[in-house]
Amino acid sequence: MNIVTKSLIVLTAMAFANSANSEVKLALDSQADLNKSGTFVWASAFKEHLEANGIAVKTFPRGALGGEKERMDQVSQGLLEVSMSAVKSAGASNKLIYGVYLPYLFEGPSHFDAAVKRAGMIKMVNKSLARDGLRLLSFVLVGPSTGIFNTKKPISRVADLADLRMRALDENQIKLFSAWGTTGTIVSWKEVPNALQTGIADGYVNPAFVPLIFGHTDFIKYFTDARVSVSTRIALASEDWYQRLSDKERTVVNDAAAKATAANRAWLKKTEPGMLTALEQAGVAIQQLSPEARAEFVARSKQVYAAGVLTPAQTEIWLKAAEK
């Protein structure tokens, strides 16, 4: 992004900065589709509750206020009230949040939500986020637990991955792929289609809807429903804005976040059963893991618990939270 573009983004945000309490700016991160986008479902329900209680909301389409880093900077400076963001946007302030990515820690969304509530995870993370002008409002699920997509062949066991090179989100995911006996290469999301078509990468780990919503089914042909980790983004708010709200307004915002989270979970429950069917209809072959194959994935994946970005103490917080 060039200097002129960045300047325009900042000026756009500043133009609304003086009306922080009268108009909430909400930056979207996906297409405005209530059927396909879990983050848009959350944002829509959040907006609806605020407006029903007298707080105006202006939404900005994906990219209108910049990428992840630009939006995070605007939120931390109080120029943008709420952003639908990646987990890593908060991870820079508190790496504890990266525990959401621990493979095979959660059996599904309900287990994840119970663990987050049990540990008081949002409150815990917000203690450090506040120092950087940020506030976590909610974990927003974007689909069912992640599986393994690739362009070349069915994957029914760990050994099948050996000759594939996977697109990695970051170094932590590369460590996971190494534990699986394969290699990874970090590729930005906008470059993924080209990487998959040219062989720079052979696949990626994502929830079932991703190739459908991003148009990857022309070259993604295989999906293993491995249920590796929860698939979540976050609703990130400006701490400065939140603290300037009156007690009544703050209650409205908290209630809006709770209703939006409930709407997001209801959306996932309703749409998840049809995601695999939609993949098959798009020409993607579905592979389920046998209990033995899954057990090997679980055993290998948990090797990264001690080698990831979390400290041993942070990992232990998540492990205890996930205990039944």
Image (cartoon, rainbow, N blue to C red):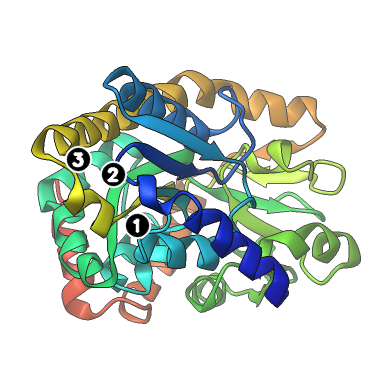
Q: Tell me the residue that label 1 is attached to.
A: 100
Label 2 SS? helix
Which one is nearer the viewer's eye here, 146 or 232? 232
The residue to which callout 3 is attached is 114
Would you say the residues marked 2 and 3 are in contact, meaning their CB atoms lie under 8 Å apart? yes
Query: For the residue carrying disc 1, how many other residues have a C-alpha within 10 Å: few (<14), some (14-19), or many (20+)?
Result: some
In the picture, residue 316 is in which quadrant?
A: bottom left
- Characterize the local packing of mark 3: few (<14), some (14-19) or many (20 or more) Cα atoms within 10 angstroms: some
Label 3 residue SS: helix
At label 2, counting other C-alpha atoms closer than 10 Å, the crowd grade (few under 14, some 14-19, many 20 or more) is some
- The quarter in which the N terminus is drawn is bottom right
* Farthest-out residue, right: 198
Q: CA distance from mark 2 to mark 1?
A: 8 Å
Q: Position of residue 289 (x, y in %)?
A: 55, 44
Q: What is the x, y in percent for residue 273? A: 53, 22
Give the quadrant of residue 210: top right
The disc, 2 or 1, on the residue closer to the chain's N-terminal end is 1
Q: Residue at x 51, y 33 (%)?
A: 40
Image position of 141 (left or right of 224): left
Return the residue nearer the eye: 209 or 178.
Answer: 209
The C terminus sits in image quarter:
top left
Amino acid carrying mark 2 in the image = Phe
Q: Is residue 322 visible?
A: no
Residue under numbered circle 2: 112
| Type of amino acid under label 3 | Ala
Check disc 1 and report its element: helix, strand or loop: helix
Residue at 55% across / 70% down in the picture?
180
